[in-house]
Amino acid sequence: MIRIAVLVSGKGRGSNMQAIIDACKSGKIDGEVALVLGVNDEAPAIQRARNQGVPTVSISPKTYETTEAYDAAVFDVLAAGDIDLICLAGYMRVLGPKIVDRWRNRILNVHPALIPAFCGKGMYGHHVHEAVIARGVKFTGVTVHFVDEDYDTGPIVLQTVVPVDEDDTAETLAAKVLVEEHRTYTDAIALFAAGRLQVVGRKVRILAE
């Protein structure tokens, strides 16, 4: 059983976090959410985790003089928690190099589009769906990938396609994509927990059971 840390945003509801917690409880993921870490103690996701008895830690970047000092504090909490896998769920900051090095190929993120389309710095949440609608593409989707030193550039684990209907708005598309985020993200975490992911260069192989 793996120990998972979920890193959440300062404002998000924590629906992906909840999907991970539920998948651990149901046995889909052979693991437990041992820690939820955020930047704001009043964030809905932090409150949601706390109400379910999941240990939470809030570390505000505003209380540190440098990014390096903040990253060091996050590193120390994750290391003390004996964390096997870090899952980003709306966490908006780039992880420091020390964290990426320590948990190389053990940090997952979910992105609401098919990388390498509609990704990179500034492409998150509603910005992605608005760009998809504006561009007029026929398909979008979900990508789960390992995290490296840059935005959305790590090895891709799983992708799921979501059709874009002619009458879709950014809001309706976001709702459709979110359903697949929950499923695809927990699928990828389950594969990791089962030891079935092998990173070879920029590719991820899914090993047979």
Image (cartoon, rainbow, N blue to C red):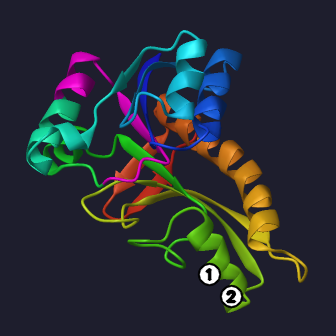
* Residue 95 in sight in this render: yes
Residue 194 seen: no
Coordinates of residue 74 in the picture (x, y in percent):
23, 33
What residue is shown with label 2? 134
Q: Are marks 2 and 1 in contact (CB under 8 Å)?
A: yes
Residue at 26% x, 26% y is 78
**What residue sits 36% from the left and 61% below the top?**
154
Please state which amino acid type lies under the numbered disc 1. Answer: Ala
**Quadrant including the C terminus:** top right
Whether residue 184 is situated above or below residue 35 in the rendered picture: below
Left or right: 75, with 36 as reference point? left
Mark 1 surroundings within 10 Å by alpha-carbon count, few (fewer than 14), some (14 through 19), many (20 or more): some
Disc 2 crowd rating (10 Å Cα; few below 14, some 14-19, many 20+) is: few
Residue at 26%, 49% in the rendered image: 95
The residues tagged by marks 2 and 1 sit, at their Cα atoms, a distance apart of: 5 Å
Q: Secondary structure at mark 1?
A: helix
- As displayed, is residue 103 above or below residue 201? above
Q: Which residue is mark 1?
A: 131
Please, is residue 180 above or below residue 183 in the view? below
Q: Amino acid at mark 2?
A: Ala
Magenta segment: 76-93
